[in-house]
Image (tube, helix red, strand yellow):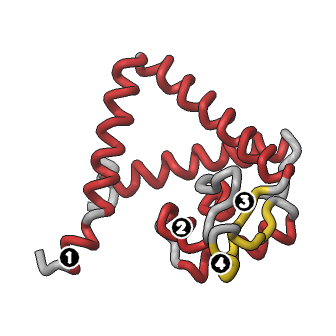
Amino acid sequence: MGDELVEPDVGMLTGQYMRAVQEELFETLAERGHPDVRPRHGSVLAFLDRAGTRPTDLAQRSGQHKQIVGTIVDELVQLGYVSREPDPRDRRAKLVVPTASGLDEIAKARAILAAIERRHAQALGVEAYATFKRALQEVAGLQRRWRQTRDAGG
């Protein structure tokens, strides 16, 4: 039993893939002027609207708890990537708004990720990669619904 190779399960595969993508993304971002951005910051930066986003919406979009999002926003404010601004629709609420540096990081991150996807599509074939991505989106959605099913007693 000790020397058997275990076929990787979906958790292992997705974890390996995520770590490898993050490694390339954040090393390349550092080379392109954003050395202070870390993977945890992606749970805010990846989900920001140009005009700003409420922290509760960031938490919902990213699947993170509001307190974690608040801590990450604090870090990004200190690093100069976002600011907190009053929401023009509700002065009691705040928006997390990307700064010029934040917008630059977001644009570069999206370009790096697009290049990674192009490379994978070229290696697998465009249609095979598109099929893989659709299936992964569907499986991710099914997994996110696990909590709803569990909480509903199903």
Question: Badge 4 local density, few (<14 within 10 Å), some, or many (20+)?
Answer: few
The residue located at (17%, 78%) in the rendering is 152
Question: In terms of sequence position, does the residue under pointer 1 or pointer 4 come before the other?
Answer: 4
Residue 93: assigned label: 4
Q: Pointer 3 and pointer 2: residues touching (CB < 8 Å)?
A: no
Q: Element at badge 1? A: helix
Q: Element at badge 2? A: helix
Question: In terms of sequence position, does the residue under pointer 2 or pointer 4 come before the other?
Answer: 2
Kindly identify which residue carries mark 2: 57
The residue located at (35%, 44%) in the rendering is 137
Question: Badge 3 local density, few (<14 within 10 Å), some, or many (20+)?
Answer: some
Marks 1 and 2: which is nearer the front? 2
Amino acid identity at mark 3: Arg
Amino acid identity at mark 2: Asp
150, 125: nearer the viewer: 150
Quadrant (top left/top right/bottom left/bottom right) for the C terminus: bottom left
Question: In terms of sequence position, does the residue under pointer 1 or pointer 2 come before the other?
Answer: 2
The residue located at (74%, 39%) in the rendering is 108
Marks 1 and 4: which is nearer the front? 4
Amino acid identity at mark 4: Ala
User: Does 60 sit left or right of 76 as displayed?
Assistant: left
Disc 2 versus disc 4: distance between alpha carbons? 12 Å
The residue located at (22%, 80%) in the rendering is 151
- Residue 91: x, y in percent? 69, 78
Q: Element at badge 3? A: loop
